[in-house]
Image (tube, helix red, strand yellow):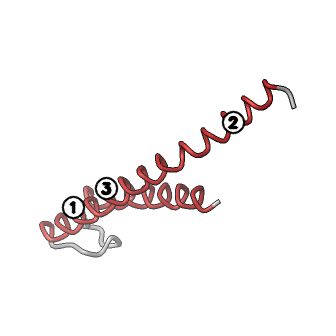
Amino acid sequence: MSIVSKIQSTRRQRNSIDQTPSIENLATALRNTERALLESIEAEEERSRRHDPDDPQYSMLARSMRRRLDNLRKTIATLEAALAA
């Protein structure tokens, strides 16, 4: 193995190791955002007195936040799957 190959291999290993804490930190931050968003949805549902997303008079703000929450949860699941791999 040439010295260049060894250096490239070492860099790949180091980059792989360095990214793990970053992904973990990102997943943790997104979990915190998930909790805050869920609290905001609950507060909006209380304010509007509508708790059923299928209700035609359900708050548009809560509906929008629910879509964002779904997307956020998919992102978190993707990150956690990457960590498990």
Q: Are marks 3 and 1 in contact (CB under 8 Å)?
A: no
**Disc 2 target residue:** 10
Q: Are marks 2 and 1 in contact (CB under 8 Å)?
A: no
Q: Specify the quadrant that holds the C terminus.
A: bottom right
Residue 80: x and y in percent read 53, 60
> Could you tell me the amino acid type at mark 3?
Thr
Q: Specify the quadrant that holds the N terminus.
A: top right
**Foreground of the two, 13 or 36:** 13
Task: Say few, some or many: other residues with alpha carbon within 10 Å of mark 3 (under 14 / 14 to 19 / 20 or more).
Answer: some
Q: Give the farthest residue toward the right.
A: 1
> Could you tell me the amino acid type at mark 1?
Ser
Cα distance between the residues tagged 3 and 1: 10 Å
Choose the circle earlier in sequence order: 3 or 2: 2
Q: Nearer the viewer, mark 2 or mark 1?
A: 2
Residue beneath the point at 52% across and 61% down: 77
**Disc 3 target residue:** 33
Cα distance between the residues tagged 2 and 1: 45 Å
Q: Is the residue 26 above or below the residue 73 in the image? A: above
**Disc 1 target residue:** 40
Choose the circle earlier in sequence order: 2 or 1: 2
Relative to 84, is 27 on the left or the right?
left
